[in-house]
Each structure stands twice: as C-alpha cells, then as structure tokens.
C-alpha cells in the first residue's frame, strides 16, 4: 500500500465508501497523538514536550455524511497521520476513541 503524503497540513478526500484524512504531523511520536470521534466531528490533538517547551497541535473536522464510528481506523507513519472514516447510512454512535497504530 502506497502511503499518501499530504501537500498541505491537512487533506480530506472521499473514496467510494469512506473519507480519508491525512495530517502532516512531523516531530511527534505515535503516543503523542490523540484521535477521537465525537458528535459528528473528528478531533485530533498532539503534544510534544521537550527541552522546556510544549508543542501542541489541535484540529477538529466536521464531515457532511454520517460515519461508522466503530469502524474508524488511524495509523501514523513517516510523520503522517492517516484516518479512514467509513460512511454510514444509519445513526452515529455518541462518541468513540480511535487507536493510532
């Protein structure tokens, strides 16, 4: 599988059955990143502490279709976080935390 390298800090695109979000997050470890799905929004935050400073990243994305929160996947490799959000025809669950691999 070829990894997508975003041209911008955040890229969102739609496939046939899901939304794909790619976020450029250089200088973070996987354990620094928190990804959550809540109230129809994707929440991504990351914090890196080192040498007396804290670098914090926060981004919230709303999507125009209902998403299957239980089927959301996320991975982080080569400084890029990729989140796949499958489109759902039914109701959204109230909130789900997504593990970053």
Image: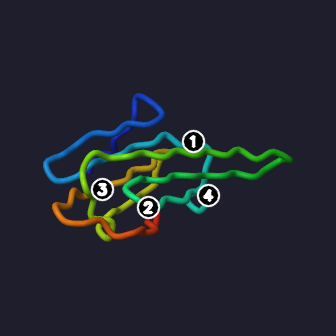
Earlier sequence position, callout 2 versus callout 3: 2
Judge whether 66 appears above or below 51 on screen. below
Residue 18 left/right relative to 54:
left
Earlier sequence position, callout 4 versus callout 1: 1
Question: Which one is nearer the viewer's eye here, 24 or 14?
Answer: 14
Identify the image quadrant of the C terminus.
bottom left
Check disc 3 and report the residue beneath it.
85
- Give the residue at the far right of this rendering: 52
Q: Check disc 4 and report its element: helix, strand or loop.
A: helix
Q: Check disc 2 and report its element: helix, strand or loop.
A: strand
Q: How far apart are labels 2 and 3 at the CA level?
A: 12 Å
Check disc 4 and report the residue beneath it.
32
Check disc 1 and report the residue beneath it.
26
Residue at coordinates 33% horizontally, 65% vertically from top-left? 69
- Give the residue at the far top of this rendering: 7
Question: Which one is nearer the viewer's eye here, 77 or 69?
Answer: 69
Badge 2 vs badge 3, beta-carbon distance below 8 Å: no
What mark, if any, has residue 38 been given in the picture? 2
């Amino acid at each position: 599988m070829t990894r997508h390298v975003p041209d911008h800090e955040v890229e969102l695109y739609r496939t046939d059955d899901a939304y794909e979000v790619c976020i450029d997050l250089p200088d973070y470890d996987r354990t620094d990143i928190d990804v959550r799905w809540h109230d129809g929004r994707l929440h991504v935050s990351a914090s890196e502490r080192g040498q007396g400073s804290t670098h914090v990243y926060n981004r919230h994305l709303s999507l125009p279709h209902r998403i299957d929160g239980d089927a959301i996947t996320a991975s982080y490799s080569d400084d890029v976080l990729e989140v796949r959000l499958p489109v759902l025809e039914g109701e959204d669950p109230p909130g789900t935390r997504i593990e970053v691999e």
